[in-house]
Image (tube, rainbow, N blue to C red):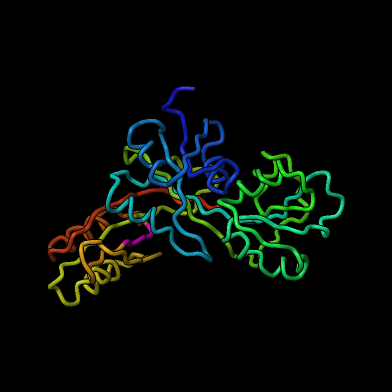
Amino acid sequence: MDNQKRIGFLGPEGTFTEIAAKTLFQEEERMPFPTIRACLEAVDDGTVEYGVVPLENTIEGSVNMTLDLLSQQVSLPIVGELVLPIRQHLLVHPELDDWKRVTRVLSHPHAIAQCHIFLQKELPNAELSNAASTSAAAEYVQGSDKVYEAAIGNELAAEKYGLTIAQSDIHDTEDNDTRFLVLHKTAAALPRTALFREDRVTYKIILPSDYPGALHQVLAAFAWRNLNLTKIESRPMKTGLGNYFFIIDVERPNREVLLQGVMEEIQALGIGITVLGEYPCFVVTAK
């Protein structure tokens, strides 16, 4: 397949990021990368056409590496977003006849933490071991000669490594979603599909160090136009203590003049504002 039709994602294979990439790009070839930086650099140099990386999880919070790369080091616009429910399953070797005999459970530390109640109730004596990813845990269980070892992972990992889903949806809370961003070299947004929820704009705001009330002025520019902010987050500029920039997500209105007015008003105040992307947000609902 031609390089320009490849979709890069934060690997390894069988992770939730690959599920996100597969959800949005069902027919294209997918290519895993070991780090978020490597994935974005592959988009930038044309190795892949799109890159899919995690941005935020309901429980674990923001992925700071993604935020910092997009806002300070890589000039790639956001062209789409997917919100994906995180469903964790207990994966066992197909030769194991009774999953309650499991003596060791492996997974990424976040996945183990997300399934704490199930593990304490159903497998209280099992040893809990950390792996580099949920997919790596599944791969280990596949190759292990100890059938009483299990992994916590998703259905894609189970399929890829030939494991059996012994117990489905073992995570502690149903409200566990992850936001994934899609990056491209141009600002051409992804086409809308049946999963479309809303349009969004993401801004980077840099405040002058000697401007009291600057953040209030920025928020007021959105507020009096009735523009809904869905998120605001600060990140260090890495130029000295106390120097921060802000990432602001806004529901994109139907009237383009409102966004133009925000840009002009904030720029007139001497405040730096950059558009990181105008894009559709897609949502997969939990089954």
Pick the front one: 271 or 127? 127
Which residue is found at the position 27% from the left and 57% from the top?
A: 259
Across the whole image, how many numbered discs are drawn on residues?
0
| Left or right, residue 225 beside residue 35 | left
Up/down of 68 relative to 218, above or below: above
Q: Position of residue 169 (x, y in %)?
A: 70, 58
Determine whether 3 is above or below 184 in the image: above
Question: Splitting the image into 4 quarters, where does residue 38 fall?
Answer: top left
Residue 287 visible? The answer is: no
Q: Please state if 249 lies on the left or on the right of 148 as rendered.
A: left
Q: Residue at x 50, y 49 (%)?
A: 196
Q: Percent x, y for residue 190?
A: 42, 41
Q: Nearer the viewer, residue 82 or 115?
A: 115
> Which residue is at 86% across, 54% downward?
98
Q: Is 159 or 143 nearer to us in this picture?
A: 143
In the rendered image, which quarter is residue 263 located in? Answer: bottom left
Residue 2 vs 95, above or below: the answer is: above
Residue 43: x and y, percent? Answer: 37, 37
The answer to whether residue 99 is above or below residue 39 is: below
Outermost residue on the right side: it is 97
Q: Position of residue 270 (x, y in %)?
A: 12, 63
User: Is 26 left, or right, of 47 in this rendering?
Assistant: right
- Judge whether residue 143 is colored magenta: no
Image quadrant where one finds the C terminus:
bottom right
**Which range of residues does the magenta coloring cover?**
247-251
Q: Is residue 231 left or right of residue 125?
A: left
Residue 226 lies in what quarter of the image?
bottom left
In front here: 249 or 13?
A: 13
Magenta stretch: residue 248 in it?
yes
Report whether residue 89 is seen: yes
Q: Main secondary structure of the magenta part?
A: strand
Residue placed farthest to the top in the image? 1
